[in-house]
Image (spheres, rainbow, N blue to C red):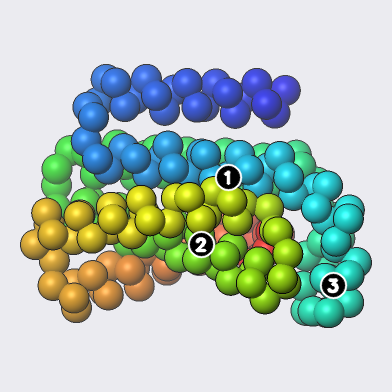
Amino acid sequence: MNVLFLTFVAQMSLLAMLTVGYGVIWLFPALFLIHDLEEIVGLKSWIERNGEAVGGRFPRFAPMFRGYTTERMVKAVVEEYVLCLLLTALASTGKLPLLLLWYGAFAAYTFHLVVHVAQSVVLRMYVPAVATSVLLLPISLWLMYEQAYVLGMSLSDSVLYVILGFALVALNLLLVQPGRRGFP
């Protein structure tokens, strides 16, 4: 059921890209889904193989591995993906405040990719989603640069909306997903 639902959501996002337009901002939902599918597919088996050892080296993260289920992960990803689609659809109207809010959320997503690469470096092993992080990070950084240029953003504007994006993500994690803090 989870895979079927995710497939449905992916198809709806492709439909949205075709009906709303091919604007470059629609790369966000596509990149998000590609990345999070790698996490969904690989995280459970990775935790089974490495959770105890990683939890021993980094006790702070041990509780995050306990009680992990793919179903809970899928629910969290779908909720975030729906927000991503909604924010992108609103930003595609071309209204500057919505585009800037989209920029902040996309910056938070891009930082999330950096976190996966850092996790892999610190742990000295593959972590779920590092492969797509390495592949999608250059595209994401380009998209951030391109959108900052198109929107005529100064460095201070970029920093402000990146902070706003992080606050939006943190608020979502605290209010909508209170059981999901940090990794995974």
Tell me the distance, in whole angstroms, between the alpha carbons under discs 3 and 1. Answer: 22 Å
Tell me the distance, in whole angstroms, between the alpha carbons under discs 3 and 2. Answer: 21 Å
Pinpoint residue 62: horizontal percent, then vertical percent.
83, 71
N-terminal-most mark, 2 or 1: 1
Q: Which mark is residue 112?
A: 2
Q: Is residue 148 visible?
A: yes
Identity of the residue drawn at 79% across and 79% down:
58
Quarter location, residue 164 = bottom left
Looking at the rendered structure, the kind of residue marked 3 is Gly
N-terminal-most mark, 3 or 1: 1
Identity of the residue drawn at 57% across and 65% down:
117
Q: Is residue 131 left or right of residue 12?
A: right
Identity of the residue drawn at 42% across and 68% down:
167
Which secondary structure, mark 2? Answer: helix
Residue corresponding to mark 1 = 36
Residue corresponding to mark 3 = 55
Identity of the residue drawn at 60% across and 56% down:
130
In the foreground, 102 or 46:
46
